[in-house]
Image: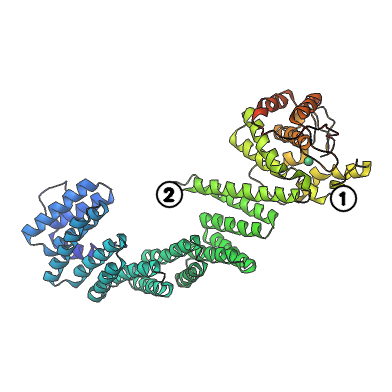
Amino acid sequence: MSNSHSEEWVRQATATRRSGSVGPLFKVGSAADLLHEARAKERAASIPEAVQCYEAAISTAERNGETAVLAEALRRLAIVLHYRNESERADALCNRSYKVACGLGNDVLAAEALNTMGGIALRTGALEEAQHHFIQALDLGGQSRELLARIEQNLGIIANIRGQIVEAVTHYERSVEAYRATNDEHGCATACMCLVNHAEAHFLRERYDEARRMAEASLAIFDQLDSRADKSEAYKMIGMVYRETGRPALAESRLRTAIELAVSAGSVLNEAEAARELALLMQTMGRNQDALTLLNTAHRLFGRLEARVDLVNVRGKVSTLETTYFEVVREWGQSIESADSYTFGHCERVAQRALSVARELECDDTAQTAIRLGAYLHDLGKVRVPHEVLNKPGPLTREEFEIVQMHPLWGLELLAAVEFPWDLKPIIRWHHERYDGTGYPDRLRGDEIPLAAQIVGIVDVYDAITTARSYRPAVSHDAAMAEIERCRSWWSEAVYEAFIAAVPQLGTRGPALLAETIQRP
Ligand SMILES: [Fe+2]
């Protein structure tokens, strides 16, 4: 419920009584001064002091016959008490405020009291009663454009709760019109943002039709206000609805417009959020490179906002975004597996186990994230290896093996246009390098091989041995460990030791059969 500016009338009515300075609590002064001070205490969240001040304003107003101040102080105190769950007292004060205003013959103050009664009823879920009060308030005080704007907004909230979308939109439009008539741009934007917020609430409840209609109504208003940042929000919501209702082309166009508007308005937050939503659309369309590029844009933009204390929950948004990153990357990794049924779950196991080894090596959070994501995508390049080579039952020819050995470089090519906030590419390129220089594709040696690539490399080998492949059955954990021990020159001492230490957490499994080869990727 909106209550701003309502002291304006009282301020005007009592301006001549002002002493000019606001003194400490209970300083002898006019009721108007005390009311003014009570408002200041309330805004500063000093609620007990504000209550005392309102009570002092009320008794002073009663004594001095400052009736308008009395009506306003009663109403303001009612609001504070309502928030303190003293609803009965709040109701009584509001009723008294209404009667005092009526006795004074001041329709606007009486309507303010009714609007507050409606607001209190609304918060307690008494919709009928709330609506009754608001309509009465409208009849009585509708000549004040500023009050009319707030009452229409409240009626819009009720219609929305009842699912009467057309009525809700009409009330909001009237509210915005009234705000505009008083040149209150802030009020306009607030009423309109209410529409967007309602649209979002409908979206979250999967009421897509309602969400779209509200977002479109707000767009029409924002258009008149020429508020590009707000228009961007509305376009984003419409795009999200189209995405969820299976209309990807429309969704893409609306979300791209949202991004453009946010950029031209200089709204980094809106740009980041619209980019994230478009990334989700790209993901549903299987356009993984585009999804990751957009996620990277969003990540970079949110990063720029993290230092801003005035924006709430940017860290939370970044964390949600990182979850989305994992989902897109994991899904992409799994899509590689589907071409190779023998390695089902391979990426997930490699990611989890690589993480265990990374923790053993006390890698920091950023490195751990890179290792998990890199593990999901390490074999991305295999999508270019012909199916018959990848799934060949017997040994590979030299030519076939050369093709397979291209997969780290092909993976990198597939990601050439994608920037990541984490350093994944070394993992993809060098997960088959060996510490003794016998690996591929670059025959790196020793510490030339990044630690993250070595970690993914060792758990990849372990998983390759312990799961069945087209060319051999699975091998037991013990036999695999013996094989890794035999090949320990492939990894640095530190990585090998960390792997051994992490073995109990590796989630080992597998039937006992002998290893044939671990040459294959
Ligand atoms: Fe590989």
Q: Where's residue 213, x and y in %? A: 49, 71
Identify the amino acid type marked 1. Answer: Glu
Q: Nearer the viewer, residue 416 or 408?
A: 408
Disc 1 crowd, CA 10 A, few/some/many (<14, 14-19, 20+): few
Where does the image place residue 341, in percent across and percent down from the top left? 77, 48
**Disc 2 to disc 1, C-alpha distance:** 57 Å
In the figure, is residue 261 to the left or right of 354? Answer: left
Tag 1 residue: 388
Q: Percent position (x, y) of residue 77?
A: 20, 56
Up-down relation of residue 495 to residue 401 (above or below): above
Q: Which residue is mark 2?
A: 310
Circle 2 residues within 10 Å: few <14, some 14–19, many ≥20: few
Q: Amino acid at mark 2?
A: Asp
* Res. 391 in view: yes
Which residue is found at the position 33% from the left and 67% from the top? 154
Question: Looking at the image, which residue is at 38% across and 69% down?
Answer: 162
